[in-house]
Image (cartoon, rainbow, N blue to C red):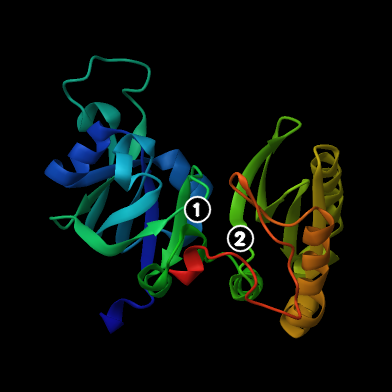
């Protein structure tokens, strides 16, 4: 198993019973070529695939329960994948057909989503996959994000990583979305390159203005701040904003405000299980 530590794991969505039967009985899964080029190109091909299941799967919903080793990946047209399907506008659509090593392996404990969120794809490492408790543990976008995420877990701040929101007809991926009793916070970890890039700074300005207009409070921290003063500056700033917005919002129940001097006050959640 140690040889797999640096192998890529692709977390893919299954949102209907038909696709699951294909994976389980025919031992392959499909991804549009366009989706790979948009979302996964930098970390393609994966060595393993895991499946995030949506609400149609009942008790297995909104969690990763199954995974498999990938044996081969080939390009195919939709008409080749589904020869019995009547010809339509999708027939010439191209897919990556991912062949897996049967049978599907079930995880000892599911990797859960606390907020029943919808996902696109997640590229992660084998090490993160086998140690993940919940979906947010899987993301592998940036060491800066990982640094803040470890602080959030320590204080039981239930943020959502890489949360996609639609604002002013634009789609934005938030590094961390934190939902509070009377507002919501977007926490961004900006690398040095982005701070030095004027064009990106201009885009960030439009982005932040759009988010603020829709009620988001945007907090940005640079590389030095996250690396050297995450506990001393970044987290206290975030906590202060959470408390000013009435504390964390957890379902229908109110959450206590965060007291950095007395950690451990928060009601039990997934990290305590």
Q: Is residue 14 above or below residue 141?
A: above
Where residue 228 sits: x, y (%)?
76, 85
Q: Is residue 89 above or below residue 25?
A: above
Residue positioned 82% across, 51% down in the render: 217
Examine the rendering and report whether any part of residue 138 can be seen: no
Indicate the quadrant where residue 233 lies: bottom right
Front position in the image: 33 or 4 = 4
> Badge 2, how many Cα within 10 Å: few under 14, some, many 20+?
many
Residue positioned 74% across, 63% down in the render: 257
Question: How many numbered discs?
Answer: 2
Q: Is residue 263 above or below residue 78?
A: below
Residue positioned 31% across, 39% down in the render: 58
> Badge 1, how many Cα within 10 Å: few under 14, some, many 20+?
some
Front position in the image: 197 or 144 = 144
Residues at discs 2 and 1 in contact (Cβ within 8 Å)? yes
Residue named by callout 2:
158
Examine the rendering and report whether any part of residue 121 can be seen: yes
Secondary structure found at label 2: loop
Front position in the image: 95 or 230 = 230
Report, in whole angstroms, how far the alpha carbon at label 2 lies from the one at label 1: 9 Å
Where residue 40 sits: x, y (%)?
47, 53
Residue named by callout 1:
114
Where residue 109 sits: x, y (%)?
31, 63
Quarter the C terminus occupies? bottom left
Residue positioned 45% across, 61% down in the render: 134
Quarter the N terminus occupies? bottom left
Marks 2 and 1, the one that precedes in the sequence: 1
């Amino acid at each position: 198993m140690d040889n797999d530590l640096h192998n890529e794991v692709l977390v893919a969505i299954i949102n209907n019973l038909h696709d699951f039967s294909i994976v389980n009985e025919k031992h392959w899964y499909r991804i549009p070529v366009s989706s790979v080029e948009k979302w996964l190109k930098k970390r393609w091909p994966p060595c393993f695939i895991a499946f995030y299941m949506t609400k149609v799967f009942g008790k297995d919903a909104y969690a990763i329960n199954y995974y498999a080793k990938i044996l081969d990946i080939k390009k195919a047209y939709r008409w080749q994948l589904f020869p019995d399907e009547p010809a339509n506008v999708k027939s010439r659509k191209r897919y990556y057909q991912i062949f897996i090593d049967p049978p599907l392996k079930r995880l000892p404990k599911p990797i859960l989503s606390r907020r029943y969120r919808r996902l696109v794809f997640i590229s992660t490492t084998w090490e993160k996959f086998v140690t993940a408790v919940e979906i947010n543990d899987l993301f592998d976008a940036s060491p800066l994000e990982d640094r803040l995420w470890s602080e959030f877990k320590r204080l039981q701040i239930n943020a959502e990583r890489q949360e996609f929101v639609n604002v002013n007809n634009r789609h934005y991926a938030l590094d961390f979305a934190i939902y509070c009793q009377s507002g919501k916070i977007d926490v961004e970890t900006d690398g040095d390159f982005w701070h030095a890039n004027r064009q990106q700074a201009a885009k960030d300005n439009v982005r932040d203005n759009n988010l603020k207009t829709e009620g988001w409070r945007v907090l940005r921290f640079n590389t030095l701040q996250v690396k050297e003063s995450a506990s001393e500056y970044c987290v206290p700033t975030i906590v202060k904003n959470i408390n000013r917005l009435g504390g964390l919002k957890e379902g229908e129940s109110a959450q206590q405000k965060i007291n950095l001097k007395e950690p451990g006050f928060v009601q039990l959640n997934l990290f305590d299980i």
